[in-house]
Amino acid sequence: QVQLVESGGGLVQAGGSLRLSCAASGRTISGYAMGWFRQVPGKEREFVAGITWNGDGIYYSGFVKGRFTVSRDNAKNTVYLQMNKLEPEDTAVYSCAAAQGVVPTTFSTEYDYWGQGTQVNVSS
């Protein structure tokens, strides 16, 4: 079992930055691809970014547009999402997830473990 806990969310003005962290426990995540997803009420969860087990492969959704950076530190069992130039449309609950395998997928159903999420609010 892998437990995931996100942190770093909050309220920020448009154009600002936040750094989300996803701390894992119970098992090392070095063998897992990791993904970040977000969800707003009434909408489906959507893929934001993913990173391969060793960090060599990184994937982003189109709406990121170079504003976000995903990274991981397997020694600390933690994954990060640096978000810059935030827009009101980025307001959502952000969750991290772990998938057994090498490459992260955009499909949430492919992930085995999920955190509870952290709320990000971007004001205009």
Image (cartoon, helix red, strand yellow):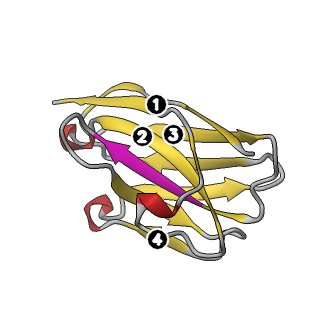
One can see residue 41 in this view: yes
- Estimate the x, y position of residue 48 in percent, counting from the top left: 39, 57
Q: Which of 66 and 25 is in front in this view?
A: 25
How far apart marks 4 and 3 lie (CA) works out to 17 Å
- Estimate the x, y position of residue 15 in percent, counting from the top left: 27, 40
Mark 1 or 4, nearer chain start: 4
Q: Which of 30 and 84 is in front in this view?
A: 30
Which residue position is annotated with label 3? 19
Mark 1 or 2, nearer chain start: 2
How far apart marks 1 and 3 lie (CA) works out to 11 Å
Query: Which residue does the image show at 76% across and 65% down from the upper left?
Result: 31
* Residue stretch rendered in magenta on the structure: 34-39
Eye-nearest disc, 1 or 3: 1
Magenta span dominant secondary structure? strand
Q: Look at the image and tell me in which quarter the N terminus lies.
A: top right
Label 1, secondary structure: give it: strand
Local crowd at mark 4 within 10 Å, few (<14), some, or many (≥20)? some
Label 3, secondary structure: give it: strand
Query: Which residue does the image show at 77% across and 61% down from the upper left?
Result: 30
Which residue position is annotated with label 1? 118
Local crowd at mark 2 within 10 Å, few (<14), some, or many (≥20)? many
Which residue position is annotated with label 2? 94
Mark 4 or 3, nearer chain start: 3
Q: How many labels does the image show?
A: 4
Q: Do the residues labelled 1 and 3 touch (CB within 8 Å)?
A: no
Three-letter code, disc 1: Thr
One can see residue 16 in this view: no
Label 2, secondary structure: give it: strand
Answer left or right for 50 relative to 94: right
